Amino acid sequence: MSRKRKINRVSPESVKAPSKVFSQKPLPPTQSIVDRSVQRSGLSYDSFVRLIIQSALSRLSIWTQADLDRLLLLAERLSLDPLNNEIYATEVSQDSGKKARIVFVVGVDGWSKIINSHTQFDGMKFVESAPGDDELPLYFECTMFRKDRKVATSVREYMYEAHTGQGAWLTHPRRMLRHKAMVQCARICFGLSGIYEPDEANRIETAGQNTENLSTQKQPIKNQNPNHSTTSFVKKWIHEGPKEKSFIDITDNDV
C-alpha cells in the first residue's frame, strides 16, 4: 500500500529576496596609492611630487607612473619613507641593446626599520669569527629570533665572498660585512623580496658593465689564436701533464 508523501510548498512571496536580507552598502571610492602617500606625508600634492622626484626618483633618467606606483606600494607595505631615501629607485645596466632595469633599494637604516617594526621580531645577535691572516674576520653570522617560531634563523656571510675592494669595504670592512649578514638574515627570516641593499645594487650594476665589456672585447672565433683557445690548452695540459706547481700554490703566492 503506497503512501502519499506530503510536500509543503513555499510560495515565492514568502521567500525574501537576497537583496533585502543582506543589505548592500555602497563601497567607498578606492584611493590611489599616490593619494594615500600624499595624505600620510601631510604635504600638498605639488610639494609631495616635487620632493619624491628630488629624493627617491632622482637616480632615474626616465620613469613611468607604474614605476612610481611600485615604489610607493613597496614603501607602504614596508612602512618606509621614500622622501627620506629609506627606499629609492635606481637603474642597473642590462646587456647591450637592452633597456636599463629599475630596482628598488633600501638603505641600512631602512632595513633596520623593517626588522624592528615587524610584529614577530624578538631580537637578533651577531657572531664575529676569529681574524684571518689579514686581521679581518673570516665571517659574520647573524641570528634573528621570531616570537612565532621555535627555531631561530642564522645566516653567515664570508669576507672573501663579500669584499669588493672598493668604497666602504676598504675603510669599514667589518661594518659592511655585519650589514650584509643582517640583510640576508632578514630576507630569509621575514620573507622579504623585491628590494635590494645598496651594495647589492652596485654589484648588479658592475656585473652588467662587465658583461657588456666582455661582449664587446670578445673576438670572433675565426680570428682567435688557436694556441690560446681553451680546447688547445686542455689538450696540451693532458698531453704534457700538470705542472709541478699546483693551482693552490700559485694562488697562495700571488696573495
Image: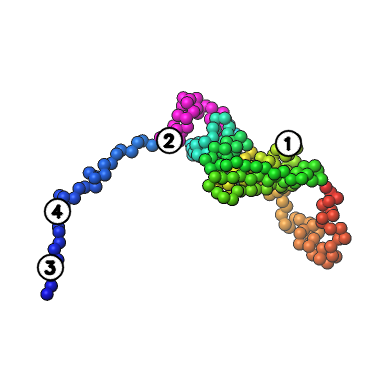
Q: What secondary structure predominates along the stretch shown in magenta?
A: helix
Q: Earlier in the sequence, mark 3 or mark 4?
A: 3
| Amino acid residing under circle 4 | Ser
Tell me the SS state at disc 4: loop
240 and 140: which is toward the camera? 140
Residue wearing tag 4: 11
Q: Earlier in the sequence, mark 1 or mark 2?
A: 2
> Separation of disc 3 and disc 4 at Cα?
21 Å
Mark 4 and mark 1 in contact (Cβ < 8 Å)? no
- Residue in the image at 85% along x and 65% along y: 240
Residue wearing tag 2: 32
Q: Residue 6, percent across and down?
A: 13, 63
| Amino acid residing under circle 1 | His
Tell me the SS state at disc 2: loop
> Separation of disc 1 and disc 3 at Cα?
93 Å
* Residue furthest to the bottom: 1
Q: Residue 47, percent across and down?
A: 50, 25
Which one is in front in this view, the residue at disc 2 or the one at disc 3?
3
| Amino acid residing under circle 2 | Ser
Which one is in front in this view, the residue at disc 1 or the one at disc 3?
3
Residue wearing tag 1: 172
Q: Which of the 4 image quarters holds residue 135?
A: top right
